[in-house]
Image (spheres, grey):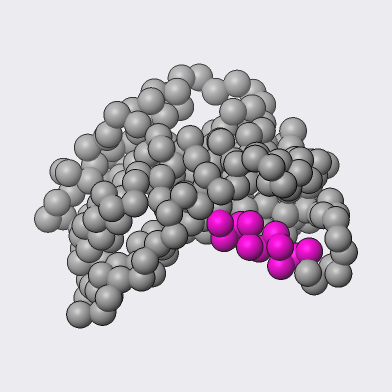
Amino acid sequence: MAQSQPIPQGQAAELLPTGDEKDLLLQIRSTHTHEIVIGLCGSVGAPTEAVSNRLKALLEGHYSYQSYVTKLSTYIEKYAESPINKASIYSRYHTLISEGNRIKGTYGNSVLAELAIAEISIRRDQKLKVSGGSEFQPERFCHIIDSIKNQDELNAFKAVYGDLFICIGVYSSPEAREERLKQRGITSFMDHLVTVRPFEVRVETRLRARLPPSLELWRDKAAGWTWAGHGSVERYLS
C-alpha cells in the first residue's frame, strides 16, 4: 500500500496578514479588479463542473481573463493512503468520500481549501518570476474553485481573500441530482449523497428565492440548474 504524503498544516493561516505577509495581502488586494477567486458550492450531484467550465469560457472569451479551475478533490487523490479506486464511477465516489473524511479528520475541515490557497499563492509567485519584476502587476486572472463542501472551507477562502472572493451557489433540485447520479451509475448509496446537509441547506434556501435581475446572467433553466452569487460577477470585471 502506498504511503500517503504528509500535508503541511496551517497553510491558510500562514497567508493571513501578519508582518511581511500583510504587505503581500495589500499587494494582492491592490489588483482586485484584475484578479479574483470564485468558489463554487453545490450539493453532491449538482453540475459544478459544467458551471466552472462555462465560467472559464465566459471569463476568457468575453473579459480576457486567464482562468484556472482547481478541483479540491484532486488533493484527496494526491494525499490518499492508496490510489483512488477508479474501477467504476461508484468506486471513485466512494473512495474519494472515505479518503476525504480521513484527511479532514486528521488535518481539519478546511485543509483542502488551505491547499488550494497555497497553490494559488505559488501560481502568483511564478507569475512574478516570469515577469521579472519586483512588484505585482495588475493582470486579468481568475481562480475557480470546484467545489466548496463545508463552512470551514468557505471561511478559509473569505479569511484570506476578503472581497476578492466570490462564492457562487450551484442549485439543482434533488430530482435532477438523483437523475444525474443514476446516469453515472451511482445508485448503491445515492440516498445518502442526495440528502442535503445543513451547510448546503443554507445555500439552496437562498437560491430558491427569487433572484434579482442582476443575476439573470447566471440562470440556465433549460439545463436544469441555477448559478448565482452575491451580486453580479460583472461588477468585478473591467
Please provide the residue range marked out in magenta.
118-128
Q: Is residue 215 left or right of residue 4?
A: right
| Residue in view at x 87 percent, y 64 percent | 133
Is residue 223 among what the camera can see? no
Residue 38, position as x, y percentages in the image? 59, 44
Residue 143 in view: yes
> Could you tell me which residue is drawn at 27 percent across and 34 percent down?
197
The residue nearer to you, when weighing 75 against 198, is 75
Q: Per the image, is 87 magenta?
A: no
Q: Is residue 171 left or right of residue 134?
A: left
Q: Is residue 134 above or below residue 223?
A: below
What residue sits 18% from the left and 49% below the top? Answer: 190
The C terminus sits in image quarter: top right
Outermost front residue: 19
Residue 6, above or below 12: below
The quadrant where residue 22 appears: top right
* Predominant SS along the magenta part: helix
Which residue is at the front of the view, 107 or 156? 107
| 170 in relation to 119, above or below | above
User: Count the marks: how many?
Assistant: 0
Quadrant occupied by the N terminus = bottom left
Q: Residue drawn at (26%, 49%), measured in percent from left and top?
A: 105
Residue 62 higher or lower than 80, as above or below: above
As drawn, the residue found furthest toward the left would be 188
Give the image location of residue 3, x and y in percent. Answer: 27, 76
Where residue 40 appears, as percent x and y from the top left, is 50, 44
User: Residue 121: which quarter of the image?
Assistant: bottom right
Q: Is residue 120 magenta?
A: yes
